[in-house]
Image (cartoon, rainbow, N blue to C red):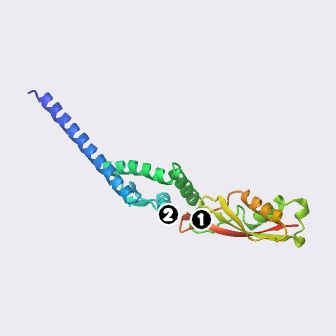
Amino acid sequence: MHVKHITLLITLLNFFHLTYAQSDDCEIGEKMAMMDKAKSTYGIYFFALPDAYTTTYNHVLQNHGIQVKMAGDIITKIGECYNNKMESYIKDEFGQDFFDIVKLKADSIHNTGQFNRPAAFPGGEKALAAYLEDQLSIEQKDFTQLSKVHLEFIISETGSISDVRVVKAISDCGECNESAITLVQNMPKWLFRIEHGIAVKSRMNIAIPLKR
């Protein structure tokens, strides 16, 4: 057999061996993902040397119950196929926009450089007071004569407001209580709470002054 033919044959054999091996590795990775899913365990292999941003991103993932498997900076076929399979499981379980939400949280934390902060109205207490005054009608701006509706609500990990409820009502003015709830529900997004670099939910209380 001609030398060129032998070289070509060896090259083809090596190619098919490598392709078959990669196919086996991919099958192994997918089976590993399936086994973890059967145990309700969700994880992602991370192929990179950690830096400040990726550390924050991984913390956010872990905060959602996703295990981060550090795998060095060399991407393996097993890990790649595991991730592809597992990402589909995670989206089915937590929503198709799960990874977009994680990135949004990580970006916000990384860009602000804040790893611990309480939830707050954008601009702080003065901005909140100005917002309330602006939203109240002209007749309600004499604060010395106002009664207050005390409310409790949740600030999500993205700053959205939910679960608004009255904890201390104006007893003889149901309309006032409802107006206070609507005012809070219509507020802009708050700055969410951060603990150790992780966005977390928080429960807030506020007193809305309303004149009967």
Q: Is residue 71 visible?
A: no
Residue furthest left as drawn? 1
Query: Vertically, is 196 above or below 20?
Result: below
For residue 144, what is the image quadrant? Answer: bottom right
Q: Are marks 2 and 1 in contact (CB under 8 Å)?
A: no
| Amino acid type shown at disc 1 | Lys
Query: Vertically, is 137 above or below 91?
Result: below
| Amino acid type shown at disc 2 | Asn
Q: Residue at x 71, y 66 (%)?
A: 165
User: Picture coordinates of residue 163 (x, y %)?
Assistant: 66, 63
Dot 1 alpha-carbon crowd within 10 angstroms: few under 14, some 14 to 19, many 20 or more: some
| Observer-nearest of 16 and 23 | 23
Q: Which badge, 2 or 1, is on the more N-terminal residue?
A: 2
| Observer-nearest of 67 and 180 | 180
Say whether residue 134 is left or right of residue 188.
Answer: right
Q: Can you tell which mark lies on residue 201?
A: 1
Q: Can you tell which mark lies on residue 100?
A: none
Say whether residue 42 is left or right of residue 159.
Answer: left
For mark 2, give the secondary structure.
helix
| Picture quarter with the N terminus | top left
Q: Can you tell which mark lies on residue 63?
A: 2
| Picture quarter with the C terminus | bottom right
User: Picture coordinates of residue 198 (x, y %)?
Assistant: 54, 64
